[in-house]
Amino acid sequence: MARIAGIVIPSEKQVQIALTYIYGIGPHFASTILAAANVEPTTRVKDLTEAEEQRLRELIDSDYTVEGDLQRQVTNNIKRLKDVNAYRGLRHKAGLPVNGQRTRTNARTRKGKSVAVGGTQKKAASKT
């Protein structure tokens, strides 16, 4: 059970895949880190030696912004965009797509569940 950057990475997976469980490390950074630490990418996490684990830990701590620090940085960037009333900040505030995607159709992930416009359905006949 390896703990890197405050995250317990899965011990049954290969190291190159397990490192991607850390927020801020994707497949590309994982392969770069493993090359710099001289660790075979296909070894399982449970088979790592203590020295290899320590090298990975030190390398990530010194060279990469991950987990809480990165999330704080992203949040501050979005907050800054909102404060200066940038277009992207306004889109974040409104809960709409930020990067120019179409909103006439789709965009349901950002906009939420669709709401039917009132008055479009026929009313049921009432008994008199």
Image (cartoon, helix red, strand yellow):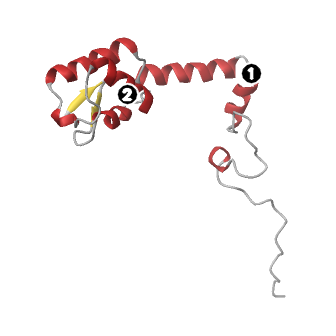
- Residue at which label 2 appears: 31
Give residue 99's quadrant in the image: top right
Instruction: From the viewer's side, name the closer residue of 85 and 103.
Output: 103
- Give the left or right position of residue 49, taking residue 23 as reference: left
Q: Nearer the viewer, residue 4 or 71?
A: 4
Residue drawn 82% across and 71% down?
121
Count of numbered circles on the image: 2
Q: Quadrant of residue 60?
A: top left
In the rendered image, which quarter contains the C terminus? bottom right
Q: Secondary structure at mark 1?
A: loop
Outermost residue, top side: 62
Q: Quadrant of the N terminus?
A: top left
Task: Return the disc, 2 or 1, that comes first in the chain's sequence.
Answer: 2
Residue 13, percent across and down?
Answer: 27, 41
What kind of element bears circle 2? helix
Residue located 68% across and 18% down the image = 83
118 vs 108: above or below = below
> Horizontal and vertical percent for residue 74?
54, 23
Q: Amino acid at mark 1?
A: Ala
In the image, taking residue 107 as reference, residue 14 lies left or right, namely left
Mark 2: few, some, or many residues within 10 Å (few <14, many ≥20)?
many
For discs 2 and 1, the disc positioned in front in the rendered view: 2
In the rendered structure, find residue 86 and report the number of the disc placed on it. 1
Q: CA distance from mark 2 to mark 1?
A: 36 Å
User: Which of 26/2 is in front?
Assistant: 26
Q: Is residue 1 left or right of residue 22?
A: left
Residue 15 x %, y %: 28, 33
Amino acid under label 2?
Answer: Ser
Q: Residues within 10 Å of mark 1 (few under 14, many from 20)?
A: few
